Every structure is written in C-alpha cells, then in structure tokens.
Amino acid sequence: YIAKAKNATNLSLNDLAIKYYQSAIDANPMGAEAYFELGCLYTKMEHYAQAVSNFNYTLEINPNHAAAHERLAYIYTENEQYELAYTHAQKAIELDPLSPSAYATMGIYYCIQKEYINAITWCKKALEIDPKYGRGYNCLGFINFYKGNEAEAYSCFQKAIKYNPKDIDGYYNLAVMYRKKENYEAAISTCKKGLAIDPNSIKLYYNMGIAYRERKMYDKSAQCYEKILELDSTSVKAY
C-alpha cells in the first residue's frame, strides 16, 4: 500500500494516495512509516492539522523518529508556534545531528527572539551540512529581511529557488517580501510563478489574495480565497 501511495503522490493523485496510506494503517496500525508518509503528504498539501496528527501518531509508535520531530518543527514554524518548533527541532538534532531542516528551524526561532547572531549561526550550520539546501537559504533570507537587510534577503530567496526550483517556499518568501514593500505587482507575479509549480498551494493563494486586495482588485482577491476553500474547506485563512 505504501509503494502505491508514493506512486499516486508522484502523479499528484493525492486523494488516492491518502486512501492507500489509510489502507496501510488499517493493515498495520503499529507501523510508523505509513503515519509518517501520510503526514508528509498532508504537509505538502498544507493541511497542517492532519499532518501534525499523523506525525504525533508516528512518535507514539516510535518516540525517537527524528524525521517526525523535524517535520513537526517545520510545521510549527509555519504556524508561528515557535516554542513547539524549538522543542521538536532540538529533539531532531539530538537524534540526527545531520538534519539541516532542524538547524534552519532553530535559526528562525532565534530570529524571532531577535538573537540575530545566533539565528544566522544556526542557518549556516544547516548550509554546512548541505550547501544547496533551499530551506537554509529561505531561513537565512527571512532573518535578513527581519533585520531590514532586503538586498541580502532577496539574494537568499533567489538561491533557495535556484537550488530547489520545485519547492515553492522561495517564491512564497520572495512574494511576501515584495508585498510588505508594497510592490504588489511583483508579489502577484511571483505567486503565479510558484503556483505554476504547485497549483494547490494555499499559502501562495493567500498571499496573492492579500496583494490583489491591496490593489483594490477585490474580485481577483475573492477568487484566491475561494480557491483556498476549495482546497481546504476548514482553512481559517480564507475567512
């Protein structure tokens, strides 16, 4: 079932993949892998509540599952629950000292605490492990933007896109930067580039909806929020 689910995921048949993962769980309720992979799929779909639930099930079966801790750290960072992100990132590093994502999460945590030297140090550790790690550059870009160093932030987001062109986070972060600088056309254009890679990204539609709203293009803004509800009817962002 898990192999079939992964094949379905590769074909973007997410609903079918979920059914296969659920079949794998029904067949072996104590198998951590099915819960973990289902959590990864929900993370990709930006259905974070379901993802957290499955990663927690993974950890109930195997408390030392480093990748589940790392994934939870990522999700809690995305949801701005930084203390939880810190806790899981610490555990991920303890279990797997070569987990670049956990180091990047630590960088974001210290950035929020305004401990910028610490934050940059953690992100650089992620990039020492993997010099082409896109999230490392995304997090470094976030820190630089937070500090007001926009040119360096832009460079980091561009590197994230260069090294991981199929990951929409670089486009999302770049679009957020443009939007906060009130460059709404560039924000919308960047969101569209990301949506060409992942047409079902809730956060890209959300960011684009805000940019359209700021430009007083209310019909287009509403279309973005309607798309979010189509992708996830429980999403509070669309309301």
Image (cartoon, rainbow, N blue to C red):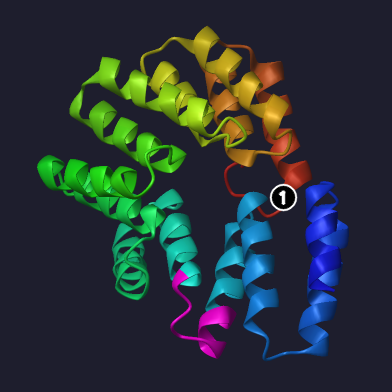
Which span of residues is magenta-colored?
57-66
Residue at (58% x, 30% y) in the render: 165
- Near-viewer residue (86 or 231): 86
Secondary structure state at the residue bearing disc 1: loop
Residue 59 among magenta residues: yes
Residue at (28% x, 15% y) in the render: 151
| Magenta-drawn stretch, dominant element (helix, strand or loop) | helix
Residue 102, image x, y percentages: 36, 58
Q: Is residue 123 left or right of residue 209?
A: left
Residue at (34% x, 66% y) in the render: 84
- Near-viewer residue (5 or 208): 5
Instruction: Find disc 1 in the rendering and name its residue.
Output: 232
What is the quadrant of the C terminus in the image? top right
Residue 132 among magenta residues: no
Residue 30, image x, y percentages: 67, 91
Residue 88, image x, y percentages: 36, 69
Q: Is residue 35 left or right of residue 175?
A: right
The amino acid type, in three-letter code, at marker 1 is Asp
Residue 199, image x, y percentages: 73, 33
Query: Which picture quadrant has residue 208?
Result: top right
